[in-house]
Structures are given as C-alpha cells and as structure tokens.
Amino acid sequence: MKIECKKVIGFGNRIEQSRKNAKLSRSEVCDALGGIAISTLQAWEADTREPPISKLMALSQILNVEPCYLLTGERHSQSLNVTREPQPVYATKPQTEEGEVVVIKAKLQEAIETLEEVLEITQREMKPAGKAQMVWAFYELLTQEKSEKEKMVGLLKLVA
C-alpha cells in the first residue's frame, strides 16, 4: 500500500518563502519592522521563535500576504477572488510637507475602539506597549487599505 503525503510548509517556511517572493532581504524586512535584529527574523524563519501579533500584522503588510496565510497556509483572498494590491512599507507614515506625521483623529479612535473590542471578545489583555503597536497597525489598515472594522476583528480572531 502506497500512501501519498502532501508536503506541509510550516509557519517559518511561509515567512521565508513570502520574503523571497517579495524579493526582500532579511535586512530590508528587519528595517521595515522598525529595526528588529536579523537574528530575530532568522529565528522566526527557523520556527524557533514566533513574532508578536503586532509584528505579524506588520510583517504581512511588508511581505504583501494575508496574516492568515502566514499563520495557517490558507489563502482566503484567493477563494474569494480578491486581489491584494501592494502596500507601502509598514514603517511609512503619512506626512505633511514639513515632515510631521498626520493622524486622523476619527480613524485613530476607531482603531483604539476596535482593539478594545477584540481584546474583550478574545478575553485577552495586552501591555501598553503592545496595545500601542496594535493600535498603530489597525490605524494603518484603516487608512491605507480602507479596511472595514469587521475585517480586522475577523482577522484577529484567527490570530488570537
């Protein structure tokens, strides 16, 4: 009896393959993630460490893949015939001519409320620094991708 096994690609391999598909070096990805150490990214790719949720969200934007794909290997957007457009690097922020960061109060408030709602639904707590990173990730999703609140909640339920 011959049994065929489908090759399963792990979380770290999906990160590495997505990085290579995006034609980005480890150094470029680390810089875009706010200057994390290359050894940290190497550990993620080797499956010896896992990134925090906020870094996973940023990493998915940088690599132009859905966070769900990095976590599970499933490409939900393909089954829905949705094409994801390339996004600017996560570290890029809207700026005025003087170089000041522009923050839209209503979008920032929506990002904070969404995070609090997700934390309540998942019955989780976050330290202030983690909350700040997650709020910024939500804010960028709301302003760059014009995502809906429900999309973010659904996405984070998968991650949580």
Image: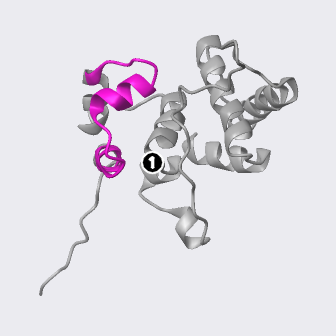
**Part of the protein shown in magenta:** 14-38
For mark 1, what is the residue? 71
Q: Nearer the viewer, residue 59 or 31?
A: 31
From the top left corner, tell me how far across and down residue 28 is, in percent: 34, 30
Disc 1 residue type? Leu
Report the predominant secondary structure element of the magenta stretch. Answer: helix
Instruction: Please give the name of the residue rendered at 70% of the width and 18% of the height, measured from the top-left corner.
Output: 97
Check residue 21 for magenta coloring. yes
Residue that lies at the very extreme toward the left in this rendered image: 1
From the top left corner, tell me how far across and down residue 113 is, in percent: 82, 29
Instruction: Please give the name of the residue rendered at 31% of the width and 33% of the height, measured from the top-left corner.
Output: 44
From the top left corner, tell me how far across and down residue 108 is, in percent: 79, 26
Looking at the image, is 1 positioned above or below residue 41?
Answer: below
In this rendering, would 77 be left or right of 70? Answer: right
Q: Quadrant of the C terminus?
A: top right
Residue that lies at the very extreme toward the front in this rendered image: 97
